[in-house]
Amino acid sequence: MNTFKLKRPLYLYQYEALLRRLPQRHAQYNAIKKDYHKYLAGFQGEESLDYILSIVNLHKEAFICRGLRLKNKANDYFFQIDLLVVTPYFIYIGEVKNHTGKLVFEPDYGQMTQLKGEAANTYPCPLQQSKRQARQLQVWLSDHSLQETPVYAHAMISNPHSQISSNTPIPELYHADLLPEMLDSLNLTNSKRIYTRAHLQKLEKLLKKENEEANHFLIEKYNLHSHEVIQTICCRFCSSRRLRRFRQKWYCTSCREKDEQTHMEGLQDLALLNVGFQSLSTYRIFLAHISAATAKGLISPYVIANEYKCKGRKYKLDINKF
Ligand SMILES: [Zn+2]
């Protein structure tokens, strides 16, 4: 059995870059930090499945994918699947939630209400989300000439301390700890082999190829201006902006520390934040007012493309080059 390891998603790095680049006194800083912690908790919830997945019993040709994001040709929209288990007999989709407190499910209304202390927050029902993904996956499979197979859409709560509540029992909804038993029972009820070894290999290869990680445009999302995140880099030891570049090193005139990598983190952050094309003078100011030649030398390994505009050449950083 092959398991795609759960990769730390790009958007977490993007949020971390934004929180590093934005001054803490910024009006949106706390709201952005709150959103980051929400995404981080979601990722940690999915990560907590690692152990459960290591003890599931599956056919030796089965494979598992985590955090998939695929595009449907017909409408050009992406759909995301937290957990996909592909076996020769069936496919299992698991939507993973990490909410705390008491979770009241009303799938008929497509909602889940989280009760925590005095607060009540309503979210889309994860089971309905999972069923929608199953429909999209069926279309995707047929677009890629793979035959129909039973697809089971379930939802899991990865936080063992949250309380699941519903008026009627919902067999497809449970704590993640029950996943091995659920897969065992699906193994028992699906005895007709649909996918051959060749089908499974084709599908696994295709999923790896077509999986497209989400790139979040946080500057646009929070209505920021790129100049708010392109503030001159600062010392890694004392946060002072009084940096000088000398003999390929950064010297801090405040704390007298020296360092070679200070610019790297800054440039990487700009790439993560998709600041796009910027003039050489913008990079010079960002890199503590260094000369044009030095700035060009420092950015050149990470630049993908440049374009001429009436105001001169512009440079864009590519995160894949770091
Ligand atoms: Zn310093």
Image (spheres, grey):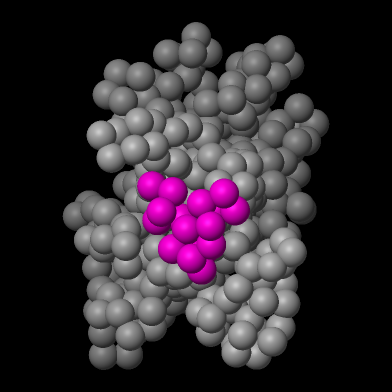
Q: Is residue 287 above or below residue 149?
A: below
User: In the image, which residues are magenta?
Assistant: 279-295
Can residue 254 be seen by looking at this rendering? yes
Residue farthest to the top, as pictured: 145
Q: Is residue 291 left or right of residue 127?
A: right
Q: Is residue 110 above or below residue 157?
A: above
Q: Residue at x 68, y 41 (%)?
A: 4
Can residue 319 be seen by looking at this rendering? no
Q: Is residue 126 left or right of residue 190?
A: left
Q: Residue at x 66, y 71 (%)?
A: 250
* Percent of width and height locating residue 112: 29, 63
Residue 288 belongs to the span the image colors magenta: yes
Residue 114 belongs to the span the image colors magenta: no
* Percent of width and height locating residue 117: 32, 90
The quarter in which the N terminus is drawn is: top right
* Percent of width and height locating residue 189: 60, 33
Q: Is residue 199 above or below residue 311?
A: above
* Percent of width and height locating residue 263: 60, 62
Front residue of 13 and 111 = 13
Q: Is residue 223 left or right of residue 96?
A: left
| Quadrant of the image occupied by residue 251 | bottom right
Front residue of 231 and 89 = 231
Q: Is residue 187 left or right of residue 76?
A: right
Q: Residue at x 65, y 25 (%)?
A: 204
Q: Residue at x 50, y 9 (%)?
A: 145
